[in-house]
Image: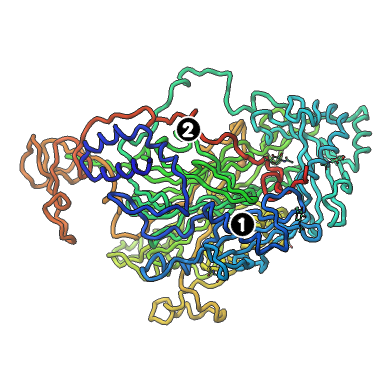
Amino acid sequence: MESRRRLLLMCLSGLGFLLFLVAFLSLSVDRGRGSRFEYYNHAGPTATPKCGSFVASKANVWADLGSDEADEVYSFLAKEWADLNITRTPRHATDNFIYTLEALQPNKSDTLPYLWTDEAAAPQRWAKAVLSQRLDGRSHYSYHAVGPLPVSPGKTRVVPLTYPFNSGRNYVTKDMPDLVSIMNFTQALAESVLDITVELLGAKVDREDPNGPDSLLAFPRPTWDDAGHLFCWVQFFRPGYNSGALSILPQGIYTRIDAVEDAAGVDEAGKWKMGEWFYNGILYENLDEFRAAIRDPGFLKTPPNLDGPWTDTEDFESQSAGRELPPPISIQPLGPRYKLDRKERYVSWFGFEFYFTSTQATGVSIYDGRALLYELSLQEAMAHYAGDDPMASGQEFLDSFFGMGTNAFELVPGYDCPGYADYFDSRLHRLGKTERLPNNICLFEFTSDHLLSRHTTQTSVTVSRNTYLTLRSVSTVGNYDYTIDYNFYLDGAIEVKVRASGYIFGAFYARHAHKNEDEYGHRIHDALSSSLHDHVISFKADLDVAGTANDMVRLAVEPTSKTYPWDPPSVKQSRRNTMHLREYPVERETGLDWPQNAGEFYLVYSRDQKNKWGERKGYRIVSGTGIGNTPHLTVLNSTLLENAARWAERDLWVVRRKDTEPRGADPFNYINPVDPLIDFSRIADGEDLFYHQERKGGDDEEDERSTLPDRGDEEEDYDGDLVVYFNVGSHHVPHSGDLPNTLMHTSASSVMFIPHNFADRDPSRESVQGVRLQLKHKRDGGGFPGQPGGGGGGSSEEEEELRLRGRRDGDESGDAKGGHYKLRTGANYFGTPYREGVNLPLEALEPDLGKEYRSGSHRVSDLSINGSAAGMWFKEP
Ligand SMILES: *[C@@H]1O[C@H](CO)[C@@H](O)[C@H](O)[C@H]1NC(C)=O
Ligand SMILES: *[C@@H]1O[C@H](CO)[C@@H](O)[C@H](O)[C@H]1NC(C)=O
Ligand SMILES: *[C@@H]1O[C@H](CO)[C@@H](O)[C@H](O)[C@H]1NC(C)=O
Ligand SMILES: *[C@@H]1O[C@H](CO)[C@@H](O)[C@H](O)[C@H]1NC(C)=O
Ligand SMILES: *[C@@H]1O[C@H](CO)[C@@H](O)[C@H](O)[C@H]1NC(C)=O
Ligand SMILES: [Cu+2]
């Protein structure tokens, strides 16, 4: 139904403005949100191309598995792994089950021939399954590839998926007791110290009323020592009743629990032991010592961290005048200007063409249908804390483990994205089920509050609107919400922007006579420290600038001293201090930091494609806009992260592209940091970046290049295809303004890819929407303000023709497309007359959210280990 409506709109868009407007008014009452009712289904029937319908020329080979495909794979695996006694929906920690199932992204070396030629077949479709097993009392997760799909007897097989992992393994193994046992042990422990929590915190854990106003929750944070031996520090929290504010309600009592040495028995809570206690800066050997200290009259207390209206996200009390009035918002009265193949998730917009997809670990990624940016995708989102208590000092999150896609919940239309946006669903195949996350990706055009360009002359003003296209999703991983944008601009620029909001993860602020400052944050409430941390969020950009053969240079703007023949003698003597450009090729895989004083341009050039001026076609990589700025991890050689996130140590990396290195991180790195599945330092390991085929040609740089040591035959395969990894995020020193929630205004950061000699001139000229105000009395306008108008005769008050300079390089002439168009005195849109008047249905401003928001509740994880892989283990009730 809705697709027909959309199709009709698209058909009409070729016709006149008035017809379009009529069509819009009669059909579009719910078009913005209506499009949200279409469900993506990869396995669905192919739409036949009709008038105006937009169909991708190639299938989205990155699309996630449809429900039918997933079912097929589950059944296939149940048979293949019959000896493992796979339970489709696990009930017990010792069950063997398929934790996640999704599409295995095809190799680029198979997709490029398919995308770029008409001969090559689509790459084979494979699924990627994570098998969770209990082996020798330990949890064992392994990756497997299942394909080709659809399942066909004799052809389809399941093989260990090892090639993406430079550990050489396809599995991680961990002592990992089931969650219920940990929670139950922690609960029992907390109940055994009610006297202490009531005395020091004024609250107690209460199985009957866990979220009550005087209740406490106790959460363990699991850590493994080098031998894989598990221990947990436990901290008490006030529950943040109804607000989810738990992470700003930590309390000041900590205790340690130890797993037994015998790994096989680790999930038997009975064998666990209570360890040290920590309170107000003092470590007590055991509970008896802590109890005795509390009874001591000289015992120093610190006030607890109490809940109150300060943790509410809405201020229910104040009523500032004007707050009840809706602010101005953006509308799209005449429909989108992008073309969308909803089934293939393919978008075309003023020269950009891309597919998108979503995965459970990393959320939305885009793949280019042209030769520019093959892949742009999130790799990992890390938060690394510091502190002087056992929880904060050991706190670190790698959020792909919890799932940036798994936790991308429904967007609020009219707020997260404009009401008129197109919305898309995601499907998650986990634990034997398919869960649909409705409307969790949106696509929209937006016109910035500032122009893309403008100029005033004596006789005219031209202003070009800065309209861009955004693909957005929001991942709420426990306390934090990450809004993730891929933005496309009319000048050819592409931007990755991430904004964080939600509750910070604060630390308890102990306050007493001897301690009144905090080295790890600011005091932002009675007993809350803002808890310094770094957010480092890694993205992969597989750039193909005018083809896959690229190289990277640092173009430096450097001071220099020189003399020139025309310099006067006095300057000749002491030399002229000036500046110049100098190019430094990036010769090996390496990490770079953004340059001091923005003194270098990081450019990815086409190896052989040049623009009309003989300059190599290039794209510049630049740290974009946002107060957060683009960071790398402050901590050197993090004790917590070990080898799990070496990518976080520099701002930007350039490496060879390989089928065997599709990703810079793996979610299971979180639980195996010492020997992770993917160690990024083995991806960026210094291989040279010379395009070896070019070497044979008579290239200027050849001499310099051939002086490098030969690093073996394998190196000769390099075809100049490089990949860039970069970070966004921030050094987050939350302050009082981060309460109750961190503001996206201050947390945003971005990286941009900007054309640099890519075209012969600014490509936005061709597509930008804007207006020319032709002033009266000077026909041949031009020149600069203040300069007398050149040539031309007098002015005409009537409609006149704007004579445009003939196009010398095209064959269009004279007609509407070519040399001139009728120009009215006054305002003219670029290339089209200016009209007034648009009518809008109320829903165009904001859909009826009471009816439109489809989620009944959200499965937001609490960042204990529940909600993650670890949260899958539970004992049979
Ligand atoms: C398979 O596991 C289920 C429970 O997980 C159990 O009830 C059943 O007996 C097992 N079957 C075999 C053949 O081991
Ligand atoms: C929880 O712990 C208590 C006491 O430690 C024990 O009696 C009970 O069996 C445990 N429950 C579960 C589900 O493990
Ligand atoms: C990082 O720390 C580990 C463990 O302390 C140490 O073995 C290693 O040499 C350190 N590496 C660097 C580069 O400092
Ligand atoms: C993808 O590339 C890897 C590494 O070369 C190879 O092992 C694997 O078989 C390829 N996958 C397919 C489906 O051909
Ligand atoms: C884990 O999360 C699930 C889903 O939110 C919830 O039903 C379950 O009670 C949680 N388990 C524990 C032990 O907190
Ligand atoms: Cu933060």
Can residue 44 be seen in the rendering of this structure? Answer: yes
Q: Which of marks 1 and 2 is in front?
A: 1
Q: Is residue 462 left or right of residue 438?
A: left
Mark 2, ligand 5, within 8 Å: the answer is: no
Q: Where is residue 742 in the image (x, y as percent from the top left)?
A: 58, 36
Where residue 411 sits in the image (x, y, percent)?
A: 50, 38
**Taking 808 as reference, is 544 left or right?**
right
Image quarter where the C terminus lies is top right
Marks 1 and 2, how far apart at CA: 33 Å
Residue at 80% over, 52% down:
230
- First reached walking from the N terminus: tag 1 or tag 2: 1
Tell me the amino acid under the disc marked 2.
Glu
The amino acid type of the residue labelled 1 equals: Tyr
Q: Nearer the viewer, residue 164 or 618?
A: 164
Q: Which residue is drawn at 13% across and 55% down?
A: 813
Q: What element carries label 1?
A: helix
User: Is 486 situated above or below 299?
Assistant: below
Along the line of sight, the residue nearer the viewer: 152 or 397: 152
Q: Quadrant of ligand 2?
A: top right
Mark 2: secondary structure: helix
Residue 807, given in percent of the width and then of the height, sits at 16, 57
Disc on res. 865 = none
Q: Which residue is drawn at 60% across and 55% down?
A: 101
Give the residue number, with chain letter if any, for mark 1.
74
Name the residue beneath numbered marker 2: 852
Estimate the x, y position of residue 147 in percent, counting from the top left.
Answer: 56, 65
Give the mark count: 2
Task: Tell me if 25 is positioned left or right of 834 in this view.
Answer: right
Residue 146 occupies quadrant: bottom right
Q: Is residue 785 visible?
A: no
Snapshot quadrant of residue 166: bottom right
Which residue ends up furthest to the left in the rendered image? 793
